[in-house]
Image: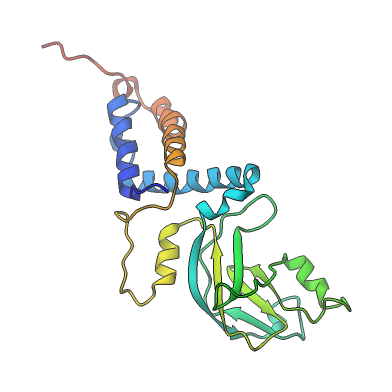
Amino acid sequence: MNSLSLNEISYNILNSIRGGRVSNAEKFSIEQIHFLVKYYRSLLIRRDQERNMNRSRMFEQDLGIVPLEVVDSSDTSNTGNILLRTESKIPTPIRLKSKEAITHISGKDKYSQPIPLIDTVRAHWMQYNSYTGDNIFAFYRDGYVFLYNTLSIRELNIRGIFEDPQQVFDFANEDGEQIYDDNSPYPIPADMVEQITKAILSTEAGLVAQTQPQSETNFEPDKR
């Protein structure tokens, strides 16, 4: 796993833009580079997962212990059934081809039996199935994880691949005792850093260069 921070990755990209004189470097702020790194990280992870599903643990992050609360079942399509929901929205998981990238749900003991995560359409119809209607399962909707058919589980362990690693750290460390910032190691493999750098230099910086006047994109050699 890469040990560079988001700042180190972003400033390396910004320095490459300056050194290559692809465009006026001032057209990019470090915040814009941060955004692009996060965007391409999500995009490349999605493509990687579609080709290499066995690499999910390389990107997986743990939300820690997530408390649940009882909710009015009329808020979902599972009216009249027992429903629990995470007390707050979880960080946004990366959207894969057919589902959100939530890779593990269990009780607070992360090594206990996993709870099946199903899509919301299937969750609606399972309540009418005579064989599975009493089974415990989870589904994700509007930023929350819902737990169906139990009141005995009041805390979950949730793992997944999320869009913004800093949101994950802040969510899992609400007490503020540990601090994550843009100088902390960024969870991304080194080969993907290279792919992101190339994508930004060839696509984003190139587009900016094409929209700038010639005086800003051309380099005049020192005539002294």
Residue displayed at 61% across by 84% down:
153
Residue 59 in the figure: left or right of residue 142: left
Residue 157 in the figure: left or right of residue 205: right
Q: Residue farthest to the top?
A: 223
Is residue 33 or residue 175 the one in the foreground?
A: 175
Q: Residue farthest to the left?
A: 224
The quadrant where residue 82 appears: bottom right
Is residue 23 or residue 135 the one in the foreground?
A: 135
Residue displayed at 44% across by 58% down:
165
Q: Residue farthest to the front?
A: 111
Residue displayed at 79% across by 72% down:
124
Q: Is residue 143 above or below residue 53?
A: below
Q: How is the image coloured?
A: rainbow
Residue 123 in the figure: left or right of residue 42: right
- Number of disc labels: 0
Is residue 55 or residue 80 the one in the foreground?
A: 55
Q: Is residue 29 visible?
A: no
Q: Is residue 9 above or below residue 72?
A: above
| x and y percentages locating residue 25 in the rendered image | 29, 34
| x and y percentages locating residue 176 in the rendered image | 32, 74
Q: Is residue 223 visible?
A: yes
Q: Is residue 129 above or below residue 54?
A: below
